Amino acid sequence: MSSEWKEETLDPENWDELRELGHRMLDDMMDYHRSIRDRPVWRSFETAFSSLKEGPPRMPQGAEKTYQEFKDIILESFSGLALHPRFWGWVTGTASPSGMLAEMLTGGLNASTEFGTEFTYYVERQVLTWIKEMLGYPSEASGILVSGATMANLIGITVARNNKCDYDVRKHGLKFTPRKMTLYCSSETHMAIQKSVELLGLGAESLRFIPVTKEFKIDIQALKESIDEDESKGHQPFCIIGNAGTVNTGSFDDLDALAGICEDHSLWFHVDGAFGAWTAITPKLRRLSKGMERADSLALDLHKWMNLPYDIGCVLVRDEKAHRGAFTLTPEYLELPEGLPPPLQEYGIELSRRFRALKAWMSIKEHGTEKHGRIIQQNVDQTRYLEKLVNETPELELLAPVPLNIVCFRYKLEGLDDEKLNGFNNLLLMVLQSNGIAIPSNTTIDGKFAIRFCNVNHRTKYEDLEYFVKEVVRIGRMLQDPETQKKYEKQVTEKISALMKF
Ligand SMILES: *Cc1c(COP(=O)(O)O)cnc(C)c1O
């Protein structure tokens, strides 16, 4: 060994110093969570862009200085967003302080959870068993934890395609298909489904978007007609995707009816229950998802209504053999001793993967299933209250029924047509968001721009909803003055164009 060659490691030179820094990080993050309510839910951060433009440093700057930069640059520019009690955009879970601690432990173990030779493998199995039990899904089903419902839907629809194709699609690919394979879902279905269909080479046009009823549920009669029409044309209908909680309005398709149609036509029944599936753990809401237990595959998230930190989703597949049949591939470098349970890569796409199960395991133990259910019920009760406030406020108009945790509404002005109202409400929403008051998101309901409130937030209080409505009304009144409207249009445009400067 040459004496001038010094061995190196990424371990600290001084463990006590790093430990002390770690304690400070923890204190800072606890304070951050604890005081989140006192901060605006969003603020401008373009002044920090310049500090992101440096190249990677060649020489070490040390842990202490790096953490200081995290605080000065990242924490200072980050608004808390989904951690905040008035964040109600998209379907964005709040997570919990103990979830953050579980993430630290996960990183600490650095366990790529993959083989039955690791204990973490069995923890994931236990978490999957718990999820099946909590949701009333068959216990013999297989499953895997994934990054989110997008990945879970992709896996479910892959298994559906491979199983329903009447030749070996893994071997031959889709170009040899004698018949066009078609799928069915409501027009309210999340884009993750179309993305999966495209990635699987089925082509977006093979996905039939069926119209919805006034309750935003798939129109069963129209669905049957569409299937019949495809069959009469010589196509091969193979899968129906049902919604347990749509992203626009939180509606549930009639899952029992869909399961029945799938049985009659021998179709695969996939359910996207990203957030809505969890209503099954809440006694008063359980009836909504009736029929979900009949699904051949079920996609869901735990980083939404189970309040775990990003990222964690799950897919369950009723027939384990069908599930593994879509993914098993064993090169010699992954061969295992006889008798071990199958590696988790046989249930999905990824090989190396994080020990996602830990935070779920800890959170379910810490809070218990009933409390998780009560939080969901609380969010739904709060949403009903907001619906009531909207209905009682003459200037506001509900744009869709409120079956669960989502309210779509707008500010109404006599004499303005939909197009003008769309512009007005768009501006109103941007003023609300960019001034850090509250973050609902937006959608379009029957051509009408809607302010969309979606509550999967365990920090929200009733008083936040009262404040929210008060502020919407205040801004709506204020923007009716043409001068003020111009001023805010300019403000919003400037804030957005500042982001383009990166
Ligand atoms: C969020 C969501 C998805 C996508 O899930 P990700 O976790 O964001 O990948 C799919 N479907 C529905 C209904 C959703 O709410």
Image: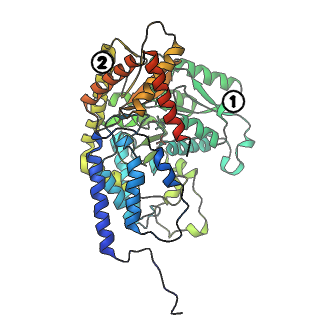
Q: Can you tell which quarter of the image residue 23 is in?
A: bottom left
Residue at image mark 2: 388
On the rendered structure, is 255 left or right of 393? Answer: right
Question: In the image, residue 492 lies at what x, y percent?
Answer: 48, 30
Question: In the image, residue 4 lies at what x, y percent?
Answer: 52, 90
Q: What residue appears at the point 27 percent right and 32 percent down from the top-left corner?
A: 378
Question: In the image, residue 166 lies at what x, y percent?
Answer: 66, 41
Q: Secondary structure at mark 1?
A: loop
Q: How far apart in space, not on screen, are marks 2 and 1 (Cα)?
A: 47 Å
Q: Amino acid at mark 1?
A: His
On the rendered structure, is 418 left or right of 97? Answer: right
Q: Can you tell which quarter of the image residue 437 is in?
A: top left
Q: Are marks 2 and 1 in contact (CB under 8 Å)?
A: no
| Residue 164 or residue 407, whichever sits in front | 407
Q: Secondary structure at mark 2?
A: helix
| Residue 60 or residue 247, whichever sits in front | 60
- Please determine whether, in this image, residue 199 is positioned above or below residue 110: above
| Residue 117 or residue 260, whichever sits in front | 117
Residue at image mark 1: 235
| Residue 316 or residue 53, whichever sits in front | 53
Can residue 256 be seen in the rendering of this structure?
A: no
Pointer 2 or 1: first along the chain: 1
- Please determine whether, in this image, residue 439 is positioned above or below residue 413: below
Question: In the image, residue 392 lies at what x, y percent?
Answer: 30, 14
Judge depth for marks 2 and 1 and give the one in front: 2
Q: What residue appears at the point 41 percent right and 66 percent down from the top-left corner?
A: 118
Badge 2 local density, few (<14 within 10 Å), some, or many (20+)? few
Q: Which mark is residue 300?
A: none
- Please determine whether, in this image, residue 263 is positioned above or below residue 37: above
Can residue 231 be seen in the rendering of this structure?
A: yes
Badge 1 local density, few (<14 within 10 Å), some, or many (20+)? some
Q: Amino acid at mark 2?
A: Lys
